[in-house]
Amino acid sequence: MAAEETRLSEAFPMKAGAGPNSYAKNSTYQRGVADAAKELLTKAIAENLDTEILLSSNTFHIADLGCSVGPNTFYAVKNILESVQSKYQSKGPNSQIPEFQVFFNDHTTNDFNILFKSLPHNRHYHAAGVPGSFYGRIFPNASVHIVHSSYTNHWLSRVPKDVTDSNSPAWNKGRIHYLKSTDEVVRAYEDQFARDMECFLHVRSQEIVNGGLMVLTIPGRPDGTPHSHAAANVTYQLLGTCLIEMAKKGIVSEDKVDAFNIPIYYMSPKELEAAVEQNGCFSVEGMEILPYVSTLHSVAKTAPLIALHVRAATEGLFKLHFGDAILDELFDLYCKNLVAQHCIFKSTEVFNFFAVLKRKAN
Amino acid sequence: MAAEETRLSEAFPMKAGAGPNSYAKNSTYQRGVADAAKELLTKAIAENLDTEILLSSNTFHIADLGCSVGPNTFYAVKNILESVQSKYQSKGPNSQIPEFQVFFNDHTTNDFNILFKSLPHNRHYHAAGVPGSFYGRIFPNASVHIVHSSYTNHWLSRVPKDVTDSNSPAWNKGRIHYLKSTDEVVRAYEDQFARDMECFLHVRSQEIVNGGLMVLTIPGRPDGTPHSHAAANVTYQLLGTCLIEMAKKGIVSEDKVDAFNIPIYYMSPKELEAAVEQNGCFSVEGMEILPYVSTLHSVAKTAPLIALHVRAATEGLFKLHFGDAILDELFDLYCKNLVAQHCIFKSTEVFNFFAVLKRKAN
């Protein structure tokens, strides 16, 4: 059942532990997103959580998908919990606030030991860790009241199959991502996204109770803009050119670079809406752009910070494919090239949006 | 809430990882107990699980307390799950078998990463890890249908406070356990056990649904026998004399040995029954002695195996207090002394019992 499905998707862990390059220490960028999301989250729950749900169970179940190990997940859960409590309290002074059970989900390769050790001592919920890809079933039928996921839905379940197949027209030779690649590669990524989102919505529709909410913070690109508009896509394009540069110097093999692709896709709100409509089990209750103070106008200055962030989020991928040895050199070169080529970010944007979906009644 | 209470109890992890001295590799002894328990488990569920429980929820929740990392927990869970499924099936061919969610609990210091990676791929349940001492609340009110725990209830929540206090009449100088110690020390351990079991039953009575079961496999001693009858107690007494021997040689400090005590207590079935009666929320539905083929008649031959087992179960404790360096020497000496002094096991017994408790209706 659960295991059967999750085995199909690959695992791309954030860098574990608490070292200087770890995700836990370098997730201030995502934390900024979480801060901005807090207000939207509170509003989303206040306006969209049905009163009947509050009465349906004596335990309220919250799930955070792709929780990683850092503090952001605890911050988000605290915000959700307080919002739900307010909702109960708004029903009158005598309304019984239920107990909360929070499920922290991430890939089996996530460092749950660190996660569990960092659980807040003064938390007002029962905590559980749930290992497995969120592209498979991870919870029982109709058992979760609110699903939250922040900064995870851009991860595909896998690298699109064709882009690493040298016999396919979608072979992505000399690149590690879809930006500035052939139409076939772009389409392979778009198709993979569509299949993954279909799967994501399908399994969540089984797990979330009728009337339950799904609140997602998604890094993407604005409606109607090309992929080149997303700063993150430009980031990975640049990272690809760094690898090619290293291949030319003989530091990594060209074949290895050709076989490597980043399983990330930056969707637009419209693409999400289309997937939700196609699935049919959720209604879109809200879709908002997160305010974000971009530092892209000063890439030259903030390059080390950007490099650190990109490294924290992706080094697991590089390590798995290329080994440890190239990491320092790769990200040093990346930082250098960020400064030298900061102009490529000129017409890009950091764009994060917030989506509130509600599980329709069956 | 949960965190508040669990912080009070100390953590005594089994040896993590998968190395040659790890618990995962050396739990065949406990596995033997699990094999013997399987039949009793099946019978306990068949005879005691109320039909109403099966209809009360569309997810059936099982919790394994003190799961550690080894395969035994998956084996026990599989047995429980199959027994519950049979129960459903016995209600007729059209009875809907629910989904199962299994909570694997152990201390926060347990190696959940290993546990999650070893989850059976063909499992028929949703898995979750729950960190925290089972002497505190770890689950929501009335949320668990079957609690299982095997070979864990002999662990106290902490070393009795007075036995390490040099100003107390219960100071346990020159010993690391209660066997052959003063009456005050024995009483301090008995009191700690009574308090811990009271706490254990209290929190479980809140977490288990009415009619829910608690099935426990407990290493202990037969009713009416002295503490010296339990082979395990003799084992720890011997381990204590090894430490004293090492202190005399100057390998460890005597003060450090005096400050060290093993937080384990071997209860009799009657002691458990008394605690259950005192608590009042459970009925004792079954209490059986597990068949066990003792190897104590040939301690001289099986000493290395016994030493390995005792090391796997307790080395976390020794490491925490004495550091890594003494471990090999301590357990080598222990093995040697086991052979030399095998006669001390003459009038002892390895005794494990199986208890089936049912949560009474409120």
Image (tube, coloured by chain):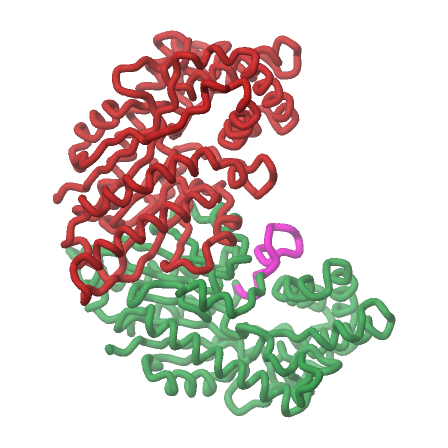
Chain colours: A green, B red
Q: Quadrant of residue B199?
A: top left
Q: Is residue A26 magenta?
A: yes
Q: Is residue B188 magenta?
A: no
Q: Quadrant of residue B275?
A: top left
> Percent from the top left, x then y, of residue B330?
60, 21
Q: Residue at x 43, y 43 (%)?
A: B72
> Percent from the top left, x then y, of residue B145?
25, 50
Q: Nearer the viewer, residue B202 or B342?
A: B342
Furthest residue to the left? B362
Q: Is residue B317 visible?
A: no
Q: Residue at x 72, y 73 (%)?
A: A239
Question: In the visual, does A324 lie left or right of B21?
Answer: right
Furthest residue to the right? A249
Q: Residue at x 19, y 68 (%)?
A: A52
Q: Magenta part of the protein: which range? A: A14-30
Q: Residue at x 65, y 82 (%)?
A: A163
> Percent from the top left, x then y, of residue A222?
52, 85
Q: Is residue B171 above or below residue A326?
A: above
Q: Quadrant of residue A134?
A: bottom left
